[in-house]
Image (cartoon, rainbow, N blue to C red):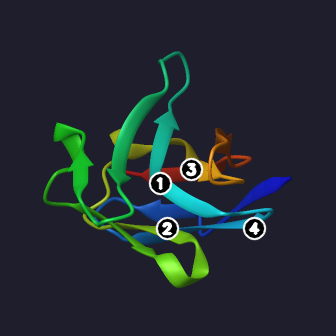
Amino acid sequence: QVRLVESGGGLVQAGGSLRLSCAASGSIFSVNAMGWYRQAPGKQRELVARITSGGSTNYVDSVKGRFTISRDNAKNTVYLQMNSLKPEDTALYYCNAVVHTSASWYNDYWGQGLQVTVSS
């Protein structure tokens, strides 16, 4: 079994910062891509940022220049540094990871979700 445990959400004023963390644990052979998604009320879940095991990153246009994704491969942990937060960043944020549990078997795992609320 693989678990993704998230931390770091909360309430912040517009212009403030938050740092989200997500640690993968369990029967892990290796971790491939890791990322953060978010879902605001009444909207579809969207990819916010993603990072490969080699460190390549991509971001949704609305967060470019404000959010930074990074990872610590030794700890199987991914981070999302969110700066200059806006009320429209308010959402439930989910960690995602593609985890190999053996050399030939992998699956997609999700965290439980973190609420991020940005007040104006």
Q: Secondary structure at mark 3?
A: strand
Above or below, comparing residue 65 to residue 109 in the picture = below
Q: Which mark is residue 34?
A: 1
Q: Are marks 1 and 2 in contact (CB under 8 Å)?
A: yes
Report how far apart the C-alphas of labels 3 and 1 lie in the structure. Answer: 4 Å
* Residue pointed to by mark 3: 97
Q: Are marks 2 and 3 in contact (CB under 8 Å)?
A: yes
Q: Are marks 3 and 1 in contact (CB under 8 Å)?
A: yes
Report how far apart the C-alphas of labels 4 and 3 lie in the structure. Answer: 11 Å
Disc 2 versus disc 3: nearer the observer? 3
Report how far apart the C-alphas of labels 1 and 4 lie in the structure. Answer: 13 Å
As shown in the figure, which amino acid type bears the numbered disc 4?
Ser
Q: Position of residue 84 (x, y in %)?
A: 25, 63
Above or below, comparing residue 119 to residue 40 in the picture = below
* Residue pointed to by mark 2: 78
As shown in the figure, which amino acid type bears the numbered disc 3?
Ala
Residue at image position (36%, 43%) is: 48
Residue occupying the far bottom of the picture: 74
Q: Are marks 1 and 4 in contact (CB under 8 Å)?
A: no
**Mark 2 or 4 closer to N-term?**
4
Report how far apart the C-alphas of labels 1 and 2 lie in the structure. Answer: 7 Å
Badge 3, how many Cα within 10 Å: few under 14, some, many 20+? many
User: What is the quadrant of residue 46 in the picture?
Assistant: top left
Badge 1, how many Cα within 10 Å: few under 14, some, many 20+? many
**Mark 1 or 4 closer to N-term?**
4
Q: Which mark is residue 25?
A: 4
